[in-house]
Amino acid sequence: MVENHQKRLHLCTCQQCQQRPLGETAALHSSINRVLVILNEKSRRRFAGLLAMQGGYGGVQYFARVTGLSRTTILRGQREIELADAAGESRIRVAGGGRLLFEKNNRKSQLRSTR
């Protein structure tokens, strides 16, 4: 069974987009958010980090408002860009993360009850 996890397009809350929702800046922010929707976690972080680096002073806070990502996520993306992961990892998350499989959980509880 394939689950369809459709991400929602973030609506920018910056002052320029609020005042002129059909302006050039609003169109640019909308296009940035359309790109972010199709990226995976790591790419999304790095893309937002790159934009914030280009934005200069105040870029992290500005693009946090534009993209809806947290400032710490954007800062992490900047750090990842600076460290330049040249390894080209195929995994997005660290191996071993997430919940244990039900079978493993069940086996542990059976072992405890037999002791």
Image: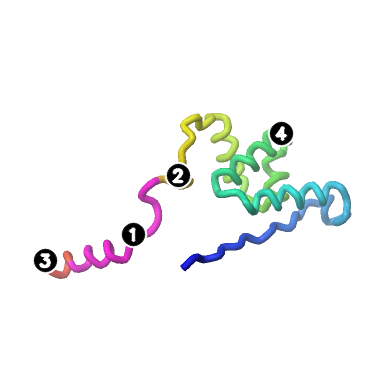
Residue visible at 55% across and 48% down?
Answer: 41
75 sits left or right of 51 in the view:
left
**Dot 4: within a 10 Å radius of its alpha carbon, few (fewer than 14), some, or many (20 or more) residues?**
few
In front of the other: 62 or 51? 51
Do the numbered discs 2 and 4 sit on residues whose CB atoms are within 8 Å? no
Where disc 4 sits, the SS reads helix
Q: Where the C terminus falls, by quadrant?
A: bottom left
Mark earlier in primary sequence (1, 4): 4
Looking at the picture, which amino acid does disc 4 mark? Answer: Gln
**Dot 3: element:** loop
Magenta highlight range: 95-110
- Residue 51: x %, y % from top left: 69, 38
Q: In the rendered image, which residue does mark 4 sit on?
A: 54
Q: CA distance from mark 1 to mark 3?
A: 22 Å
What kind of element bears circle 1? loop
Q: What x and y, as percent, mark residue 80?
A: 54, 35
